[in-house]
Amino acid sequence: MSRPKPPLPYNMREVLQPGDAACPGCPIPMAWKVLSAVFGEKMILVIPACCSSVVVGPYPGNALKASIIHVAFASAAAVASGVAEALKRRGINDVQVIAWAGDGGTADIGMASLSGAAERNHDFIYIMYDNEAYMNTGIQRSGATPYGAWTTTTPIIGKTEHKKDVARIMIAHNVPYVATASVGYPHDLYAKLQRAKKIRGFKFIHLHAPCPVGWRFDPRYTVRIAKLAVETGLWILYEYYDGKIHLSGASRPYIDPARRKPIEEYLKYQGRFRNITPEKIEEIKRYVEMNWNWIKKHM
Amino acid sequence: MGKDKLVIEKPLYDRLPIAKPMVGVAGKTGLWRVEKPVVNNSKCTRCFLCEIYCPVNVIRVEPETGVEIDYDYCKGCGICADVCPVNAIEMKPE
């Protein structure tokens, strides 16, 4: 009998320690496992104020067997640039600097330092894990919250603006590598991190991460909802390098609208879309189609 | 003599409050659990999906023995039961 082999390397087991302070069903440690499969202990995480700074745990301990720097909200990209430059000066090439920030720390508060680091093209990976609101402080609306979603600051009718597409903003900065990923597709994220590891310069990964607490769903559906976001075409997985967009394998079938699942299927699992009206669903469909047209144009 | 006392003996990183990696930073997180995942190893096909997706890193799939779960730290989120393609993991009330 042939032995089955794990699809990700075994060192995915080693870096994240059991017993972190995340809520049950949290997607952040899932993504850290993929990070550790690629980099092992040879990574330095720069974490601004976000859920992750809680997840790694209180002072005498630390849930990750990697170096972590906790920094102020707006400065993740600035500190990561400094660390990357210092490592370069000292001739250390095998350690990867990763800025790991939430959507608030990227799309709203950290935007200026992110834009600066991208313009100076510092050699590190910026990962924005996008749980679509300020979950850590109590589900406030952020720039990356989607249209129609309930948050504590958009209480009755939901958000009336569309999601800020940070990956597209980063493509406009002409950086060497930009990708979107999802925690529902760890092999896809693994392949993207492997590619990013080989590229020198600024790398940006926009990681879609469903949050059971803020999106109001049962913790067991985290992976299912992450996959539904891709299958309905709401979240498009692609990579940008060499001046072109390369659609990822998981998203390739959904370029054809007939093969996408209905958007209602994705919305019905989430309590934050409970009060959504049919007109708003039409508006979301129009927005999804617009995004796909943009992708088709730049492929 | 007063000057001698100021001589630093320990390296700098020993005197700074630096957190060290440890198992169970947030205590025994198994206590948070409401439902417990129970594995039927005869159904398991060793596809490793539960191990890859487990957010607490407590599931180990060994090709010979099957799935093992560390119940001290399992938070009982139920993702393993949801991603299992052959329904070999079942959530049972604690």
Image (spheres, coloured by chain):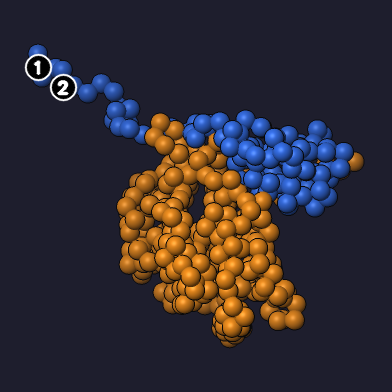
Chain colours: A orange, B blue
What amino acid type should be assigned to the residue bearing mark 1? Gly
What amino acid type should be assigned to the residue bearing mark 2? Leu
Q: Please state which of residues B41 and A127 is positioned toward the viewer in this rendering.
A: B41
Which residue is rendered at x = 41% and y = 74% of the image? A173
Q: Please tell me whether mark 2 sits on a helix, a strand or a loop.
A: loop
Q: Which residue is mark 2?
A: B6
Numbered circles on residues, count: 2
Could you classify mark 1 by the number of other residues whose Cα lies within 10 Å: few (under 14), some (14-19), or many (20 or more)? few
Q: Are marks 2 and 1 in contact (CB under 8 Å)?
A: yes
Return the chain for callout 2: B
Q: Is residue A188 depicted above or below A66 in this figure?
A: below
Q: Please tell me whether mark 1 sits on a helix, a strand or a loop.
A: helix
Q: Is residue A173 left or right of residue A11?
A: left
Which residue is rendered at x = 43% and y = 55% of the image? A138
Q: Is residue A157 depicted above or below A90 in this figure?
A: below
Q: Seen from this angle, which residue lies furthest left?
A: B2
State the image coordinates of residue A120 (x, y, percent, origin top left). Answer: 34, 66
State the image coordinates of residue A61 (x, y, percent, origin top left). Answer: 44, 33
Return the chain for callout 1: B
State the image coordinates of residue A4 (x, y, percent, origin top left). Answer: 80, 45
Which residue is rendered at x = 50% and y = 41% of the image? A21
State the image coordinates of residue A257 (x, y, percent, origin top left). Answer: 70, 81
Q: Which residue is mark 1?
A: B2
